[in-house]
Amino acid sequence: MRFTYPRSFLALLLIGFSIVAAPLLFALFSNALAFERLAELSEHAVHSAIKETQASRALLTSITAIERSGRQYAVAGETTFLEAYNANRASFQALVRQLNGMSLSDTQRAEVAAIEKHEASVHELIGRMGPVPELTRRLPREYAALGERAQVLVQLGDQAIDEGIEQLRTQAVKSRNSVFWLMIALIPTAVLLIAWFTFLIARPITQVSESIRGLGEGQFAKPIRIEGPGDMVRLGAQLDWLRERLVTLEAQKTRFLQHISHELKTPLTALREGSDLLSSGVVGNLNAEQREIARILQENSIELRKLIEGLLNYSAVHAQTSYLDAKIVQLRDVVRRAVSDRKLPIVAKGIRIELNCEHVTAYCDEEKIRIVLDNLLSNAVKYSPERGLISIKLYKDHGDAVFEVLDEGPGIPPHEREKIFEAFYRGTDMPVAAIKGSGLGLSIVKEYVQLHNGQIEVLEGPGAHFRIRIPRKKTDTEEEAA
Ligand code: ADP
């Protein structure tokens, strides 16, 4: 399922929070509803149970009152007793009506009907017999039976209360269980929703931060696209515009460098040839001072030529940074070649070279790796003291091929360890003899190492200590097979 982002980041946040809160609100609402139902049920049950019990007990009392007045009438035969009897009956009948109007169980209802019927038969008996001794004898028996029935009705009421309480308890347990299962289902849902929205919110931010880092590291090849709410997508488009701008600037810079170094070459050649002619004495003999000037001219034009070559080299590197001519390469051979290429200055300075190279192959661009090693070695030779020792190591580490180059020169101060890889940066604290570089060597080294997805670092040491790692990739298996 693909999520369609809203137009703004704020809307995404609001939607996220609402969706995450929805199941929790639902749980809260359904809990409240369950408890409300329970409360209603218990209130209703208690209320009607009390009413029923009160009415049943009143019925019992009213039967006693009828009995008393009925028996008095039977014994004395006075109309006052008959009137009292009738009044008591009326209130008895009112109670019966009240009970019938309540929500009674079937047994209770049958009992009320039976009581009513029995009382009616007793009343009929009183009306038929009138105040005679026979009635005086029969009435206690009849009323005792009626009283017993009323007693049964009271008991039935108590029983109904117990049943009601039991029902409430069952209902409470049921509600508690349903709340429990609801929570069991909703909490993981809420957690999953939180995780999903965190991902949706974090993704565009991560993409923006990665794109900016990529731009900072000079990775301009991949277009920038941000997936997210409308405003973040627009931000991505602006970043991509910035990337294109940087690509253009980079190309302009390279072109400018190429032009300028090319243009410089012609007058420089003339300058060099002129100074050569002067020094060789072809155009006439020079005195000692003139010779000295000619020598300074010659030396500096050589120096200038080196700088220009460096510039050309640098722009060439930039022109082909995306290009890797990779194949399986015996790295030990590349190291040996780099050393033999630098034989002259090494011998001239009486430098000793210590090689510690394992048999390592890697899938890489041989020429670029050679240039990397050559640059490191030429720096090492340049900054080494006379008769110093340069040590070169090559070994495998996990999936990487690792080179280390160490010398006994002044080393690189910690605050310069990042900067030396910048183009045109030259160390501040160099012995006079060594300050001849263009400051481009290490920037080319870094460029090439990164092109191989490798790393270069400067380690602590008395002298300079560089370590380069490049992934051996593909070769891991191919080498074993070879
Ligand atoms: P340069 O042409 O100046 O040598 P690099 O890019 O090769 O340019 O090196 C940049 C700076 O790094 C140098 O100016 C120097 O300060 C420092 N550096 C490089 N290699 C060494 C080394 N082996 N020993 C001491 N300093 C070094």
Image: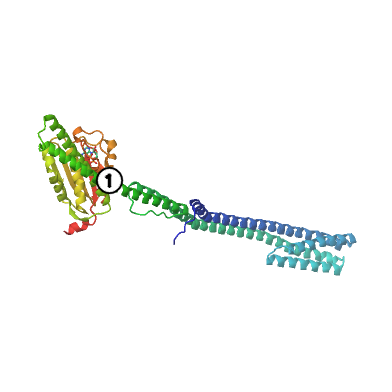
Position of the C terminus by quadrant: bottom left
Q: Position of residue 12 (x, y in %)?
A: 49, 53
Q: Quadrant of ligand 1?
A: top left
| Pick the front one: 167 or 241 | 241
Residue at 82% x, 67% y is 123
| Residue 346 in sight in this render | yes
For residue 204, side relative to residue 54 (left or right): left
The picture quadrant where one finds residue 276 is top left
Q: Position of residue 36 (x, y in %)?
A: 62, 55
| Pick the front one: 235 or 359 | 235
Q: Position of residue 235 (x, y in %)?
A: 43, 51
Please tell me how crowded label 1 is: few (under 14), some (14-19), or many (20+) other residues with Cα within 10 Å: some
| Pick the front one: 68 or 346 | 346
For residue 229, side relative to residue 412 (left or right): right
Q: Position of residue 247 (x, y in %)?
A: 34, 50
How many numbered marks have been drawn onto this rendered protein structure? 1
The picture quadrant where one finds residue 268 is top left
| Residue 455 in sight in this render | no
Q: Determine whether the residue tagged by mark 1 lies in a helix, strand or loop.
A: helix
Residue lying farthest to the front in this orientation: 283
For residue 153, side relative to residue 238 (left or right): right
From the image, tell me which residue sits under label 1: 257
Amino acid type, callout 1 = Leu
For residue 349, side relative to residue 256 (left or right): left
For residue 16, above or below residue 346: below
Position of the N terminus by quadrant: bottom left
For residue 271, above or below residue 450: above
